[in-house]
């Protein structure tokens, strides 16, 4: 499948950066089309600028009648930039129904834990790693999954494990997980581009509650 990627990111954009580097190096054959962010100060926008990728800020401030108009603006922007695959890379807003239906089976997310554990509403960033450490897990990792209406419940495309050590704190664990995220996301995208993963076939595999 030819990949024309639209990215959505809110903050650091290190996953965005890793994917753009893998495109530049030739590891991943894909065209970055646009970055949509909800935060005008996102480091992700600077990364996009440095790569000459169009970056557009769409947020609730500009679209106060949440949630439909912002949702519509996102869907329209993705279509305008001819995106055929949406990559969420640390996007801190829920994707609305219009975008979900316009890009059915074509929105991916990365989560900093081994789903189906440690996912769901409120499970983001440090909260995830805190919960993993509190539970005394011996391993954690990253998961790339397809997006559906339920937080972190869409079909899992790939996971990568890391060890959790007794001396870990949230910082050290987050760092270890992020490192594998940077490889895993591009690997999955490459598998999609090479038709090793068929997103339409995966779509029926939602996780049970
Ligand atoms: C990552 O940990 C990812 O799993 C989560 O948000 C974080 C984004 O990091 N969805 P970055 O902005 O790509 O550095």
Image: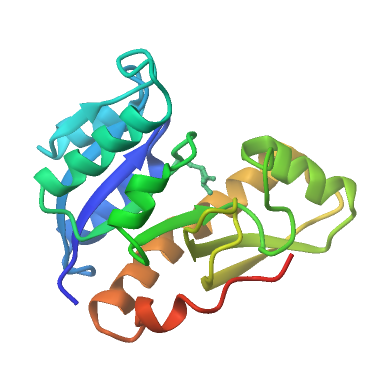
Q: Is residue 60 above or below residue 104?
A: above
* Residue drawn at (46%, 55%) of the image: 109
Left or right, residue 87 beside residue 142: left
Looking at the picture, the colour scheme in use is rainbow
Q: Looking at the picture, does residue 142 appear above or below residue 13?
A: below
For the point 59% across and 45% down, which residue is it?
175
Residue at image position (36%, 78%) is 200
- Residue 185 lies, in percent from the top left, at 41, 62
Q: Position of residue 94 (x, y in %)?
A: 49, 39
Please name whichever residue, 13 or 119, is drawn nearer the observer in this view of the structure. Answer: 119
User: Front-most of 29 and 54?
Assistant: 54
Q: Quadrant of residue 209?
A: bottom right
| Image spot of residue 164 (x, y percent) | 77, 57
- The image shows residue 90, relative to residue 38, as above or below, that is below
Percent across and percent down for residue 131 are 81, 45
Q: Quadrant of the N terminus?
A: bottom left
Does residue 174 appear to the left or right of 191 in the view shown? right
């Amino acid at each position: 499948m030819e990949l024309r990627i639209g990215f959505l990111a809110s903050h650091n954009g290190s996953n965005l950066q890793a994917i753009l580097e893998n495109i530049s190096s030739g590891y991943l054959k894909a065209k970055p089309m646009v970055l949509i962010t909800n935060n005008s100060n996102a480091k992700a926008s600077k990364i996009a600028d440095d790569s000459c990728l169009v970056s557009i800020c769409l947020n609730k401030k500009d679209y106060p009648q949440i949630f439909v108009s912002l949702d519509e603006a996102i869907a329209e922007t993705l279509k305008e930039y001819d995106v055929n695959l949406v990559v969420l890379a640390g996007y801190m807003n829920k994707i609305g129904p219009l975008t979900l239906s316009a890009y059915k089976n074509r929105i991916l997310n990365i989560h900093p834990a081994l789903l189906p554990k440690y996912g769901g509403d409120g499970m983001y960033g440090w909260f995830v790693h805190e919960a993993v450490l509190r539970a005394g897990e011996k391993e954690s990792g990253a998961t790339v999954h397809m997006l559906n209406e339920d937080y972190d419940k869409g079909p899992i495309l790939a996971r990568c494990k890391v060890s959790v050590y007794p001396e870990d704190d949230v910082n050290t664990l987050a760092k270890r997980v992020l490192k594998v995220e940077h490889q895993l996301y591009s690997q999955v995208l490459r598998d999609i581009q090479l038709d090793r993963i068929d997103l339409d076939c995966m779509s029926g595999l939602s996780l049970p509650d």
